[in-house]
Image (cartoon, rainbow, N blue to C red):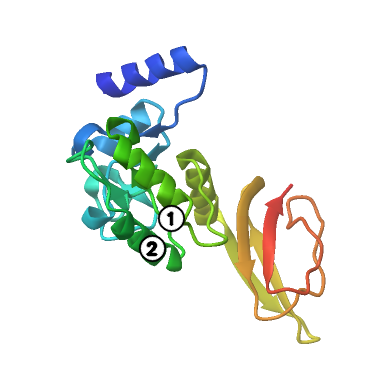
């Protein structure tokens, strides 16, 4: 707890920024990690690897490792990391192949890399970023965490009207979170009531979600 709290205060004091994310050194995962993060004011964590959690998708850490309670701390597993050899070489083809495989499943690719420790690694990083598939975005960890937290909190329900139309109700956190969803047909109308979906009807299959 001391290390978590002190390091957070030192960084906030030096930068003036609010620190909400944490990553433990050497991928350590103590039993009370979620309790420590909650007690010291963190909201997100990226200490675990996708290989260890068996998923690339973000999830809420279980409370004290119990599988029936969530801690409220969002975990963003690392898809690739160089923690064991931060000064080692970076295999361009392997990283890019895994990145494409993970993104095809619509999961974020969280990457821990130390480009300042080896000039060749910086070059490989630039090469990978310049070779990303069209439409792929690079987001900071905070934006990614906010997106997945809003996605987790969003709820969909539907009812059928007497005319045969399907009425879709969306409950989402207030604000804009880059959320979208796909439909099998066009939207015929859209409610603009307070707290409802904001936007105009669309003839396409994909609609954005912004709640006011």
Residue hosting label 2 = 102
Instruction: Please tell me in which quadrant of the rendered image residue 23 appears.
Output: top left
* 192 with respect to 108 (left or right): right
For the question of whether residue 22 can be seen, the reply is yes
Q: Mark 2 touching mark 1, by CB under 8 A?
A: yes
Asked if residue 162 is positioned above or below residue 183 in the image, the reply reads below
In space, the residues marked 2 and 1 are separated at their CA atoms by: 7 Å
Residue toward you, 193 or 101: 101
Q: Which mark is residue 108?
A: 1
Residue drawn where x is 67% and y is 69% of the image: 206
* 44 with respect to 90 (left or right): right
For the question of whether residue 70 can be seen, the reply is no
Asked if residue 13 is positioned above or below residue 181 in the image, the reply reads above
Determine crowd level at label 2: few under 14, some 14-19, many 20+ residues with C-alpha closer than 10 A.
some
Q: Secondary structure at mark 1?
A: loop
Residue drawn where x is 42% and y is 49% of the image: 127
Q: Secondary structure at mark 2?
A: helix
* 195 with respect to 149 (left or right): right
Residue toward you, 127 or 15: 127
Asked if residue 8 is positioned above or below residue 210 in the image, the reply reads above
Residue toward you, 92 or 60: 92
């Amino acid at each position: 707890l001391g290390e978590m709290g002190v390091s957070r205060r030192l960084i906030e004091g030096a930068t003036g920024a609010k620190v909400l994310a944490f990553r433990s050194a050497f991928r350590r995962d103590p039993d009370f990690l979620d309790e420590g993060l909650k007690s010291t004011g963190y909201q997100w964590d990226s200490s675990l690897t996708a290989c260890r959690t068996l998923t690339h998708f973000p999830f809420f850490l279980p409370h004290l490792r119990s599988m029936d309670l969530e801690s409220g701390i969002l975990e963003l597993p690392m898809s690739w990391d160089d923690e064991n050899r931060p000064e080692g070489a970076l295999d361009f083809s392997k990283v890019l192949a895994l990145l494409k495989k993970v993104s095809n499943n619509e999961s974020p690719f969280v990457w821990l890399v130390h480009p300042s420790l080896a000039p060749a690694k910086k070059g490989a990083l630039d090469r990978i970023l310049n070779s990303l598939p069209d439409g792929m975005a690079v987001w900071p960890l905070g934006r990614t965490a906010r997106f997945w937290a809003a996605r987790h909190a969003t709820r969909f329900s539907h009812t059928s009207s007497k005319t045969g139309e399907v009425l879709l109700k969306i409950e989402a956190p207030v604000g804009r979170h880059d959320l979208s969803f796909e439909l099998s047909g066009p939207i015929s109308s859209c409610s603009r009531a307070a707290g409802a979906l904001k936007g105009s009807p669309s003839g396409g299959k994909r609609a954005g979600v912004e709640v006011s």
